[in-house]
Amino acid sequence: MKLPIRRKVLFLTLGLSLALVMASVFISYTIFSRQIQRETLSKVEEATWNLSEEAGRRYDDFLVKYFKQGLAIYEESREEIEEMSALGQDEFADKRTFFKTLTAELFPPEQGFGMSYEKVEFNNNYRQLLGQMSLVSASNNLSGGTVYFYDEEHGNIVYLMDTASESAPYYHFPLSTEKAGEDLRAHLAKSEEPESYFEENACISIVRLTVSAEQGEATVYIDFRTSTEALFQTQRSFVRTSGLIMLSASLLISLVYLLFVDRYVARPLIRVTRAAAAFTDNLAEDKTLQPISAGVLQRDELGDLSERMDLMQEKIVEYVSSLAEKTKQEESMKAELSIASRIQREALPESGFASPGVHLDSVLKPAREVGGDLYDYFLTDADHLFFVIADVSGKGIPASLFMMRGKEVIKASAKQGLRPGEIAKAVNEELFRNNEEGLFITAFFGIYEFSTRRLCYARAGHEQPFLLRAGKAEKISEESNIVLGLFDGMDFEEDSLRMETGDKLLLYTDGLNEGINLADEEFGYDRIRGILEQDPPDMLSALQNGLQTFAGGAEQFDDVTLLLLSVQETERFSYKNPDYNVITDLTDTLEKRLRDLDPEGVAQIGMMTDEMVNNIVSYAFEGIKEPELSVMFARNGDTVRLSFIDNGTAFNPLEKTDPDTEISPLDRPEGGLGIYFVRQFSDAVSYRREGRKNYFTLVKKMKRL
């Protein structure tokens, strides 16, 4: 079902408005909650800490006496105290009477006579400390505070003081008890710094106070608490207000956005669509063609689109008008097409590229005399093979000319040593210039590294290649970049994979998978996969025969190009903590592998191996704790490839200038001849630094015995 653009914009704006409101509410709630917690915790902790310091200085004797006398009474009457402490509000009077009687010895009636000086001093200290706690609570707008000690054996907290009114239902009488919950026990066990936590609608701060006097030592706890209900009510009000403000603002912005998009996007697009539809209807009905302008005069991309549509219609009118004349010229063009076809074929490399460790086969079958497919491959240096397969939009001469232009641009970019993504970018920028016809190219760029078997690639809108590994054929490169030639300023993502011995990578143009039979069915990916997994000796011929059999006589409608990269066996020799003995071991092994080749060339291979290992051991491993050296050996017929890989310091022997061989050996400076001979005896050499490793590769062609 088609969804009109106006409706899409409406849904988008509503969704954005809702998202903004939800984000605003969430942020407001989060910020306010954190602020409330920080301020509340700071206030309660400061009050608790200040009072504990004051009590520890001025009331140490009193607290020790109170603790010891209270502890004695509590231990003597613990069960009765626990029972009376559990009484509810309905039995408050009995509860008060019990605890008044229980503490009568501690707190005689104030109007009593004959009270000892010690009792008077005790009562005064009690009232002063309690009054100071009440003052701190009131001045900081706290709910109240208590002093108690902890009976760890029975899990009870035993109250000594409470700033609440004695008539309050939650008042804790002196020596009344309460079971300590898990949160409270966890905080009681910690240090003597204030410990704070939230419990239901309250914030509680506890500090442990250990005091000493002549009578001994006592450990008590002082806590203050405050209610957070009013603060959270303010929070809810703030969040509601900010949410309403954001909702109003986002709706207003969305309305403006909707009107803007409708005026400057939706309406112009509808006009362009209607003009194009009217023109195509006239074209389908063979009416006299006249361009139908959408009349969009905006100075933006939609205005450019309308202008391009008008230009396209004019081009179509011109093309239809000249079609009859072009038909008359068809016969004379056939000869020219034949010549163009031959030139195009000769511009492509021959199939059957072979190099140590890899083999590349190719085939191109155009649907017409000339086609828009291309492939190419060549060595960029001794260690890298570049290859590309591409498909130009359209068919015939325009596609073939655009293909030839693309081929030269690709080759020039690849020979600069760029990565696949950089090559795609450079090719795209060049093809975009002067591309009035709007042609484009889909392509797959690959660079195969012999020394590591790593394939780095970038796909520009092209068909996904198949990788055949261990009898299973699967597509690679799920991500695809945009095609080449339509837009400038584009970046192209690239990826990589490590090839294994026996792997085969099939690249192809859509003429293979989209080939049709008489029933208009496509050849498809499953048939390609089935042929690959059979692994026939001649893979490309099997694919062509499979497509031809499937077509059943149906005309080939598109070019078919195939490229098959096959990875062959490569030997790897690895050495940890290598020394000069490696040279003998390695050269002896290479001589055995190459005994069917010209002895002079084998000796040169040995000399080059000696020189490279000697250089690495002598210069690269200084300061390296665990030096490692690997040598990759690959052979294809009479061509040998050696890659030396070490984890030493950066060392490029190719940067050395060649020695002056005309100077007498006695006058020539020491060193330099070894690398000079490596260059002379090799057909290709290359060096690169990647990560923390040096890679040096050489290739040499030799004669058979």
Image (cartoon, rainbow, N blue to C red):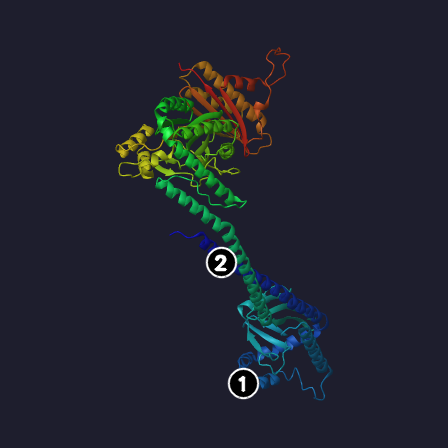
Image coordinates for residue 395, horizontal then vertical, percent: 38, 31
Q: CA distance from mark 2 to mark 1?
A: 61 Å
Q: Residue furthest right?
A: 117
Q: Residue furthest front?
A: 288
Image quadrant where residue 477 sits: top left
Image coordinates for residue 50, horizontal then vertical, percent: 69, 68
Residue at 69 percent across and 86 percent down: it is: 110
Q: Which residue is mark 2?
A: 14
Image coordinates for residue 456, horizontal then vertical, percent: 47, 34
Q: Secondary structure at mark 2?
A: helix
**Which one is nearer the viewer's eye here, 183 or 255?**
255
Q: On the rendered structure, is 270 left or right of 147?
A: left
Image quadrant where residue 282 sits: top left
Residue 460 visible in the snapshot: no
Q: Is residue 107 above or below residue 258?
A: below
Q: Secondary structure at mark 1?
A: helix
